[in-house]
Structures are given as C-alpha cells and as structure tokens.
Image (cartoon, helix red, strand yellow):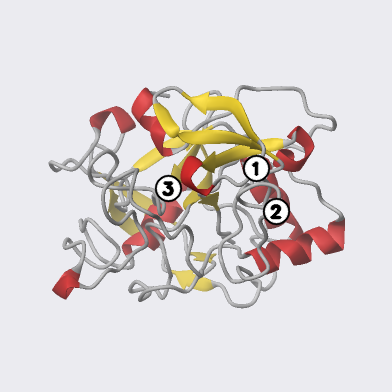
Amino acid sequence: MTDQQACCSPARVAEALPAAAAPYRGLDRSGGEPPSGMVPIPGGTFLMGNEDEYARPGDGEGPVREVRLEPFRIDPVCVSNAKFAAFVKATGYVTEAERIGWSFVFRQFASRGVMDATVPQAPWWVGVEGATWRSPEGPGSSIADRQNHPVVHVSWHDAGAYASWAGKRLPTEAEWERAARGGLERKRYPWGDELAPGGRARCNIWQGRFPTAPSRGTMPVKSFQPNGYGLYNMVGNVWEWTADAWDATHKVIRGGSYLCHDSYCNRYRVAARTANTPDSATGHMGFRCAW
C-alpha cells in the first residue's frame, strides 16, 4: 500500500495470534430463501470505475468498464453493534483485535492504553491496548449508547465469520459499487455529483480543518437519506470490507469514513477504493453483508 492509502486505513504488521481465525471463503447460498430485510439489487450491466479529475489512478479506479452481475441482495445498513453483539453471544466468537490485544484508534478519541504503534505518515492514528468493538476508544469506553452505530474494530476475518453465521457473505467489490450507485450511472456519489445538494450534508465525513477540528465519529447506521436502492451510508461513516483481494496480502475496502476529508482523502466517492490487510482493525472500518 502507498503512504496515502495507509493514512486512510492503517494496517497492522502481521503477528502471530493466540488462536488463528478460521479463513473466510464465502458461502454458496444460491438456493433457498434470502435472509429477511435484505434489499434486492437487479442484475445486468453497469459502468464501474472512474476516470474524471477526482480519480486516483494509483488506486486502480479506472478505466471505466462495463461489468455484468447476476441479481443479488445486500443489507440496507452496515452491521450494527447490537447485531454483532447477538452474533458474539450466540457463538462465543472472539475478534482478532481482542486476541491480539490492541487496535488502531484516531488519536483525538483515544482514552487510555496508547502504545508506540503509530503510523509515521499519519500520526493521527495510534495503537491502543484494549481497543475492541466493545471499547472502541480503548479501556473505559463503551458502546452502551451506540447500539445502532456500525460495529468497528472488526477485521476481514471477523466480518466473514459474522456473515457465515448469518447465512450471508461479504459483497464483491463490483456488487458493492453497483449497490452504492443506487441505479445512477457515472455519478460521483450515491445521490449525484454534488456533495451537499442545497447545502445539506448527505454523508458522515470530516467537518472542519483536518485533523485538528473536533470530530463526531460514527453515526447511526440509518443516518441521512438512503440512495435509490434504499441503502444507507454507502459512503462516509465507516469503510466497508469486501470479499475481493487488492493484491496478495490486502483486501479491498470501499466507501470512505467519518475521517475522510477533501484536503487529503476524497475517497468517499462510489468509485473510490483502497485496501487493508485481512487481520487489521480500526475505529473506522465496518461491513455490510450480501447474499
């Protein structure tokens, strides 16, 4: 990954886990009834990628190409803390961040347990001992008042484990982009080309001067207006894991997060993409499932 990619989503150096997570390989759920509440996305072709002045060639956004997909379903929202808690209660699952003992937290939010594990090219990220999905800012923090916020500090393996338990899978990158576009063609955002139509915000991204202004962090999974398919927060709020590989050691994440800002990272566009290692976890990465 490039330095600029790392500033969006820092990756941990591979390290031995006390107990290795089972590899996620997705599920074949072509038969039977889909899980309830999922949104049907029509099959067919769409134009994927971007080549305009906002595109980042090094990220592989282009060229714009025609992609054909079979019909599929996708969750209207990211997996929330409440839903992930139900999974953990039912299975006893322990996330990779919990087993490793630390995760990346935005420095402004870090409570206690700050380590020396910082990101040189992005000093606003720090490693925090005890930062997990239950304690997003580290020891002493809680999700008690954030049950309907997206779960964070989940790795690609963790997301896949939840998806398998729920009878679903992670979306492919192409499925994610098709869904995010909401039926619109060649538009920059899920709602069109203007970031804030009529001066009204349509997504949760950084407000004010980055990285010194106060940030509000994550917002509920049903914030803002849904796109044309009825999907919420396809850009901003949290990065979302996809099933696809970026290269031999990274998985693709899409959508940007509450830390994205045009001054350094405008990857809160439907064609934008970056990646992280499958065992990494941060305070701004979550996921939604497909079927």
Q: Kindly indicate the quadrant of the structure image that contains residue 281.
A: top right
* Label 3 secondary element: strand
Q: Tell me if 260 is positioned left or right of 142 in this view.
A: left
Residue that appears at 58% across and 59% down: 289
Q: Observer-nearest residue: 281 or 101? A: 101
Q: Are marks 3 and 1 in contact (CB under 8 Å)?
A: no
Q: Is residue 136 above or below residue 30?
A: above
- Mark 3 Cα shell of 10 Å, populated few (<14), some (14-19), many (≥20): many
Report helix, strand or loop for mark 1. Answer: loop
**CB contact under 8 Å: marks 1 and 2:** yes
Q: Which residue is label 1 attached to? A: 112
In terms of depth relative to the viewer, which is nearer, 248 or 122?
122
Residue type marked 1 = Arg
**Where does label 3 land, which residue?**
254
Instruction: Please tell me how crowded label 2 is: few (under 14), some (14-19), or many (20+) other residues with Cα within 10 Å.
Output: few
Quadrant hosting residue 91: bottom right
